[in-house]
Amino acid sequence: MKILAFDSTAVSASVALAEDDKLIGSFFINNKLTHSKTLVPMAEDLLKKSNVSLKEIDAFAVNSGPGSFTGVRIGVAAVKGLAFALNKPCVAVSTLDSMAYNLKMLDCIAVCVMDARCSQVYNANYCISKGIITKLCDDRAVSIEELTSELTKYDQRLILVGDGAQICFDKMKEVLPKIEIAQENCRYQNAVSTAFIAEEKYKKGDTVSANDLQPYYLRLPQAERELKKRKGSC
C-alpha cells in the first residue's frame, strides 16, 4: 500500500511517500516560498526519484487543517485534484495529530501549537507513553494565556511542538520553568508523520472521496475576523 502525503498548513511545506509502514522518501522546505509553486513539483520530483508512478499510489493524504487558510486550501486542492483524476481515496489528517506523531518515541505531554495570531494558537495536547499517543482534547483555537494556565496541572514532561512553539515557549517559560521546545528536526508539521497516520486510517477504512475532502478550519477567514475586530472583538 503506497501513500502520498502532503502538508502546506504553515510556512513549511512537505511531501512524503510511504509504503507498508516504511518511508520511501520525503521532501521538506521551510523557506517561505509560495506553496502553490512548490508543493506539486516536489511531489512530482519525489515520485520520479522513487521510481513510482502516480497510478501506483493507493491513497492521497493531506493535513487538512487547522492552519493557514491559504496553505490548507492549497494542500487540499492538490490532493483533491490528484485523487479525482485517478479515482483514488483521500485521507484527511489533523495537522495537530501529525505534529504529535513527530514525538511518538518520547514519553511526554506533546503540546502542539500553531500560530493563529490574535494572541491565540491552534492547539491540541497529547499524552505519549511507550509509543502510544492519546489525544487529551479536541483541536481548538485557544489563547496562549489560557493554555499556559491549563498546562500547570500536568506533572509529566511538557514539550512544545509546531510553528507556534517558540512563541509559546517565550511566553510560558517563566510560569512553566520545566517546559521544553522540540528540536528543530521534529518541531514542524511534516508530511512524513501525515503519511504514517494516513496508513493507519486507511487500514481502518477511514477515507473520503475527492469530492468529499474538505479543508478543516477552526476560525473564521481573516476578512471576517477583521470585520469583527472593527466592531470591537478579535
Image (cartoon, rainbow, N blue to C red):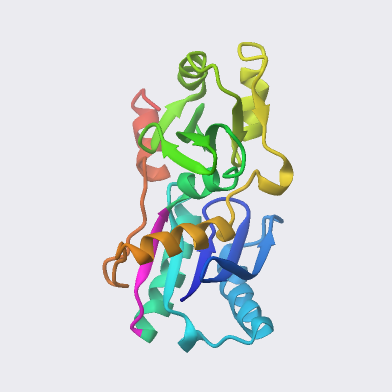
Q: Is residue 200 left or right of residue 192?
A: left
Q: Toward which corner of the image does residue 141 lie, by quadrant?
A: top left
Residue 47 position (above or below residue 118)? below
Give me the residue at 44% from left, 64% from top: 199
Q: Is residue 216 left or right of residue 101?
A: left
Residue 52 falls in which quadrant of the image? bottom right
Position of 221 relative to 196 (above/below): above
Up/down of 82 relative to 143, above or below: below
Image location of residue 43, percent across then percent down: 59, 75
Give 61 or 131, whichever is nearer the viewer: 131
Side of 104 relative to 211 (left or right): right
**Is 218 situated left or right of 160 in this image?**
left
The one nearer the camera, 177 or 103, is: 103
Residue at point 51% right, 26% down? 119
Q: Position of residue 177 (x, y in %)?
A: 67, 14
Q: Position of residue 189 (x, y in %)?
A: 58, 50
Say which residue appears at 60% left-offset and 38% top-offset: 161
Residue drawn at x 54%, y 88% as measured from the top left? 53
Region rendered in magenta: 87-93
Q: Quadrant of the C terminus?
A: top left
Horizontal and vertical percent position of residue 105: 61, 44
Question: How many numbered markers are drawn?
Answer: 0
